[in-house]
Image (cartoon, rainbow, N blue to C red):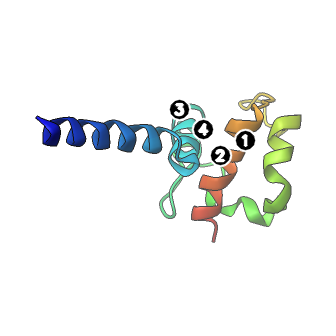
Amino acid sequence: MPLIVSGLALLLLGSAAQAQDPVKQGRKILKDFCAGCHSIKKSGDSPNKSAPPLRMLNRSFEMDSFAQDLTRGILSGHPDMSEFKLSEDDARAVSAYLRTIQK
C-alpha cells in the first residue's frame, strides 16, 4: 500500500510540475492562438504563406523584452491579425517557448 501511495504522489507531483512548465504552457498558447496562421516550430512553413514563422521573431523584436511587449499589446497592422495582449504569466511562458525555437 505505501508503494501505491508513493507512486500516486509522484504521478500527481509530476503532473503539477508539467502544468507549470512555462515552455510547454507557451507552446500551448501559441498552438491555440497563433498556429492557424504562423509556424510555431523550429522548421516548416506557416499555414498562411503571408504569416512569418515565429522562429524568426528575433529578427524583428528584441527577445529580452518581448514578454513585456506582449503584456503591453502588439498590433501588427495586418488586417487578419488583431491586436492582442497577454497576462504577465502567459507572456513569460510564450517568450520562454519562443526562445527555444529562434534561428
Local secondary structure at mark 4: loop
Residue kind at label 2, given as amino acid type: Val
Q: Which callout, 4 or 2, points to the residue nearer the camera?
A: 2
CB atoms of marks 4 and 2 within 8 Å: no
Local secondary structure at mark 2: helix
Q: CA distance from mark 4 to mark 2?
A: 11 Å
Mark 1 lies on residue: 91
Along the polypeptide, which appears first: circle 4 or circle 2? 4
CB atoms of marks 4 and 3 within 8 Å: yes
Q: Which mark is residue 10?
A: none
Instruction: Tell me: 86 left or right of 26.
Output: right
Q: Position of residue 1 (x, y in %)?
A: 10, 34
Along the polypeptide, which appears first: circle 3 or circle 1? 3
Q: CA distance from mark 2 to mark 3?
A: 12 Å
Q: Residues within 10 Å of mark 3 (few under 14, many from 20)?
A: few
Q: Which callout, 3 or 1, points to the residue nearer the camera?
A: 1
